Amino acid sequence: MMEEVKGASSFLSVQVHNIKVTEVLQDGDSLTFIIVSQKMSGTGEFHVDRTYEDFEWLQQHLFSQEDVPGIQGVIFPPLPARLQVNASSKTLRHLGFLGLGEWQPYCKALETFLRQVAAHSILSKNRAVEIFLTSSDPPGRQKVKKNIFNRLSQAVEEMRKEGHKDVDDFFQTKRDHNFLLTGYTKMAAEKFLDVVLTEQKIAVACGHFSTALHLCMEQGENPEKQDFSQVCVKLSEVFNSIKKSMTSTAMNDMNTLGLGLDLETRYQEAEKEMLFRRTCKLVELQNATKNAEKAKPVKKAVMEEAKKATETEFRQICEVAKKEIIQLESKHVETLQQALVQWCEKQLLTAKESAEVYSQHLQTFKRMQ
Amino acid sequence: MADSIRDPPAENTDFQELEDGEDLLLESAAARESEPASLPAVDISTKTNGPKQDSLFDEDTEDLFAEATEEVSLDSPERDVLLSEGPSPAITPITPPISVITPRIGHAHDDMFTHSSFDEIEEEEGGDSFDIHISVSDPEKVGDGMNAYMAYKVTTKTSMSLFRQKDFSVKRRFSDFLGLHSKLASKYLHIGYIVPPAPEKSIVGMTKVKVGKEDQSSNEFVEKRRSALERYLMRTVKHPILLKDPDVLQFLESSELPRAVNTQALSSAGILRMVNKAADAVNKMTIKMNESDAWFEEKQQHFENLDAQLRKLHASVESLVCHRKELSVNTAQFAKSAAMLGNSEDHTALSRALSQLAEVEEKIDQLHQDQANADFYLFSELLGDYVRLITAVKGVFDQRMKTWQKWQDSQMLLQKKREAEAKLQFANKPDKLQQTKDEIKEEIEELEGKVQQGERDFEQISKTIRKEVSRFERERVKDFKMIIVKYLESLVQTQQQLIKYWEAFLPEAKAIS
C-alpha cells in the first residue's frame, strides 16, 4: 500500500505487518479467534479474542464513515464470509479454499484482512480499528445502523446502473477490465479448488490401498508365503509414501496459490463494488445536473446547491478511487507473484523429497529380487 | 464349497504327504536310474483331444494312461515313471501333417517321452534356459461392419531350440486366443494343471470397435485388450508343460490357424458351455470329499482368502485410477483457465508468468495421465489377472474332487458287483449260473482295473496340483515384485519430470517484478 511503512501506522499502537490470528477456539457452534499484535513501543503484545460478529462490527464501522471525503472510492479489504461449524459440504464450498484444511486457510484470510485494514491510510484512522486490535473487552456488539455499503448483490433495479456508460475513459476501461478479470480469476480459483479436492481424494484412496495391502499379510512359515507377505508390507509402505506426497502437494496448493487466487477473487469483487458505487454517484450527479437545468427559477438555487454538493462528492470519490485502483494493481501483481513463487518453491521441495523416498523404495525392492 | 471331512480312506495308505514340490525332484532323480524308461509309442492319430466340450466329463478319454498301467506299481514310492506327462499332442480337425510335428518338437520331444518325468523336464529347463519373449502389437481392424474384427501381430523372440526360428511373427484374432485356451483347458485342466485363463470377451467393447468409433474409449479398449493378450501368452509359455504343447507352438508359429468356431459368444457351443458350467457348480456343491490330506484343505482355504483379498485390492486400485483420471481432467481445465487469466492480464511479466503456468499445468496433466495408466496397467490389470487365475486354481481343485468322485464311484460299483457275485454262489439256477458268473467275473475284472486307474488318477492329479500350486506361488511373488519395480520406476520418473517443470517455472515466477 502507498503509505504502508513496515510496522508504522500513525493511528495505531500496533505494528501492522505482523498481526497474527494465532488460534481458533470452538465452543459448540461458535468460533473465537485469538489475535496477537505487537505493541508499537516494542514493549509487548496485545492478545484479544474476537468472534466473527466482532469482525462484522469492525467492517460496519469502516463502511459507515460518511463524513470521510471520498470514502465511497475506497476499495475495502474484503472480509471472508462467515465460517459455519459442522457445515455441509455445500455450504463449505462457497468458502472455496477457506473452507479447506483445519481452519488454517481461514485464519490466514482473517489475518490478511486485518493487516490490510490496519495498513490502509484512510481506514486505519478509524477508532474502531484500534479498539478491535487492542481492547481486551469485546467491542460493542450492537448492530451499527444500516448503510449503503451492504452487499453488492443489490436489488434488481440497481443492476442496470452497472452498465451505465462512463464519462471518463480511465474509469470505463477499468470497469471493463475488472469485469473480465473478476470472471476469469473466479473461474481459475474454482478450477484450482477442484484440482486440490481431487488430490485429497487420491491421498485418501492411497491410504485405503495401503491399509488393504497391510491386511494381506499371510501367516505361515512357508517361504513363499513369507515372501508374499513381505512384498505386501513393502508395497503398503510405498502407497503410504504416495499418500503423504499427495497430501503435501494438496497442502502446498492450498496455502500458496489457493489462498492467493482466493484473495484476488475477493479483492476484485471489492473493486467491482467500489466502481459500482462511483457509477451510482455518477448517475446521481447526472440526474442532479438535469434537475438543476430543468428546475424552475424558484427551485433553481436549491437544485444548483444539490448539484454542486454531488459534484464535490463525485470528484472526491474519483480522486480516492484512482489512487486505490493504482495501489490495488500493484498489490495484485505482488500478491500473485508471491503466491506463484511460494507455490513453486514448495512444490519443488515436495517433488524432491518424494523422488528421494520413491528411489529408496525402489532400491529396497530391487534388493529383494 | 463342499466341506471336506478329514477321514483317511483305507486305500490311501501309500499316499505320501509332500510338503513341497521340490522333494519330488530329489526322489525321482534317485529313482530314475532304477527304472528303464520305455514308453510304448504314443499313438497320435486316434487320441483326439481337440476342442471337445465333453472331454472334461467323458470318462473314456482317460484311457490315455491305459498303456501305462502295467508299468506302475502302487507300492513303488516313485509314481510318475512312465505316465506321459501330458496327453498326446492335440489333433484339431485341420492339422499340420505329423511329419511337421516331429521335427519341430525335436530333442525336447524325446526328452518328454523317453525320460518322461515332469521333474526331468524341469531340469531340462535348466539346460535350454527359459528365454522367450512374446509381444502383441499392431492392432489392425480387418473387414467392415459387424463382421469386422481386430487382428493382432504376435511376435516371438526366443533362443530356445523348441522353435524353428529365433524371431518370428503371426497374425491372430481374439477368437484364436480363446480357441487356444479352450484347447489347453480341455487337455490339461482335468489332470490338474493350472491353465492361465484367456482375457474376457466384451461385447460392448468390441461393438464400438466394429462400428468404427475412433474415440478415446475404443482406443483404450483396444490397448487394454492388446496388453491382456500379451500377458496371457507370456503366462502360458512360462508354464514349462504348456510351452511345449503343440497347440501353443502352432499358435505362435503357424501362419494360418483354423478358425476357432465355438468361441462365438452366442453360438450353440457357447450355450452348451454355459450349461455345463452350471452343472459343474451344482456338482461341486454335492461332492463331499473325504479329505485325507491337510495340505489340500489348507490350500483351498488359503486360495479363498487370497481371492477375497485380491478382489478388495482390485476395487481399491480401480478407485485410485478413477481419481487420477479426474485429476487429469481438472488439471487440464485449470490450465485453460490460467491461460485465459494470463491473456486478460495487463501487466506483461505477470501475463507471461500466468501463460507459463498454464503450460506447466498442461504438462503436469500429461504426467497425471501417464500415472493413471501406470496405476491401471500395472496394478489394476495385475490384480484382475490374479483374481481370474485363482478361479483357474480353484477349478483345478474341483477337478481333483471330481477325479476322487469317479474313483469312489468305480469302487462302489465294484463292491456291488462283488456282492452280486457272492449272491450267485448261493443261487440255484445251474444253467444260467455259469454264463452269468462269467459275465460278472469279466465285469469285476474290468471294474478292478477302473478302480486302480481311478486311484492312480487321483494320486497323479494330487501330485500335479501340489507342484502347480508351488509354481503358482513362486510366480505370483515374482510377478508382483516385477510389477512393483516397474511401478516405482515410473513414480521416480514422474517426480523427476515434475522437478524439471518446477525448476523451469520458478525463474519465470520470480521475474514478475
Image (tube, coloured by chain):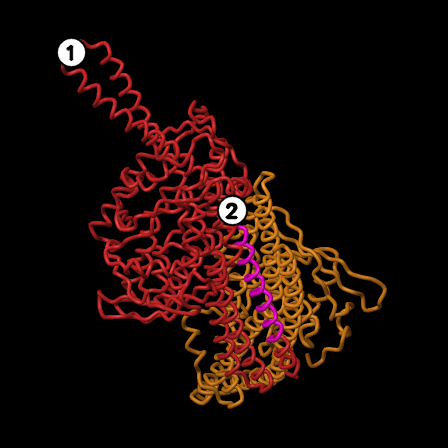
Residue A205 visible in the picture: no
Estimate the spatial distance between the alpha carbons at disc 2 and disc 1, rounded to whole Å: 63 Å
Instruction: Tell us which disc is closer to us: 2 or 1.
Output: 1
* Residue A87 % position (x, y): 53, 52
Label 2 sits on a secondary structure element that is helix
Magenta stretch: includes residue B490:
yes
Tally of marks? 2
Q: With respect to residue B414, does A81 lie above or below?
A: below
Q: Is the magenta region chiefly helix, strand or loop? A: helix
Q: Quadrant of residue A334?
A: bottom right
Chain coloured red: which letter? B
Q: With respect to residue B224, does B70 lie above or below?
A: above
* Residue A276 % position (x, y): 50, 77
Residue bounds of the magenta highlight: B476-501
Q: Color of chain A here?
A: orange
Q: Alpha-carbon neighbours of circle 2 within 10 Å: few (<14), some, or many (≥20)?
A: some
Quadrant into which the C terminus of chain B falls: bottom right
- Report in which chain the residue with disc 2 lies: B
Magenta stretch: includes residue B371:
no
Which tag, 2 or 1, sits closer to the chain's start? 1
Q: What number is the disc on residue B429?
A: 1
* Residue B148 % position (x, y): 25, 67
The residue lying furthest to the right in this view is A43
- Horizontal side of A116 relative to A228 (left or right) equals right
* Residue A258 % position (x, y): 58, 68
Amino acid residing under circle 2: Glu
Q: Residue at x 38, y 51 (%)?
A: B197
Q: In which quarter of the image is residue A344?
A: bottom right
Amino acid residing under circle 1: Lys
